[in-house]
Amino acid sequence: MINVSALAEDVGLPERKIKQICRDHGVKVNKGNGYYLINEEDYFNKLEKGSRVEKKRTLSKAHQKKMMEGKAKKN
């Protein structure tokens, strides 16, 4: 595990860009109050392979309306 600021310095990118890359590729991170640690091996492996996390599903307005109507009927 490596601190995000150390990795950003090594790679030459800003910290926020490193965090964005981690989110996009699903890299294992350990974050808490005042620290953000990245699994360095996982980071470079996933970048090398070009892995991407699937986009979250979005509901159409019609489908969302049906769901809300069903929920209202249930109550």
Image (cartoon, rainbow, N blue to C red):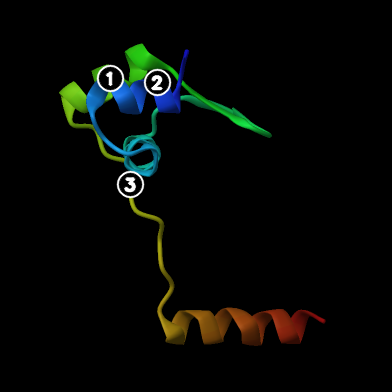
Residue located at (18% from left, 31% from top): 50
Where is the C terminus found, in terms of image quarters? bottom right
**Quick check: marks 2 and 1 in contact, CB under 8 Å?**
yes
- Give the residue type that dot 2 points to: Ala
Q: Is residue 5 left or right of residue 49?
A: right
Q: Is residue 7 above or below residue 66?
A: above
Q: Quadrant of residue 47?
A: top left
- Judging depth in this view, the residue of 10 and 29 nearest the camera is 10
- Judging depth in this view, the residue of 56 and 50 nearest the camera is 50
- Judging depth in this view, the residue of 22 and 26 nearest the camera is 22
Give the SS element for disc 1.
helix
Q: Is residue 60 left or right of residue 67?
A: left
C-alpha separation, residue under disc 1 versus residue under disc 3: 28 Å
Residue located at (42% from left, 27% from top): 5
**Quick check: marks 1 and 3 in contact, CB under 8 Å?**
no
- Give the residue type that dot 1 points to: Asp
Q: Is residue 51 above or below residue 67?
A: above
Q: Quadrant of residue 71?
A: bottom right
Q: Is residue 20 above or below residue 45?
A: below
* Residue to which mark 2 is pinned: 6
Give the SS element for disc 3.
loop
* Residue to which mark 1 is pinned: 10
C-alpha separation, residue under disc 2 versus residue under disc 3: 28 Å
Q: Residues within 10 Å of mark 1 (few under 14, many from 20)?
A: few
Residue 29: numbered disc? none
Which one is earlier in the sequence, the residue at label 1 or at label 3?
A: 1
Residue located at (66% from left, 82% from top): 70
C-alpha separation, residue under disc 2 versus residue under disc 1: 6 Å
* Residue to which mark 3 is pinned: 54
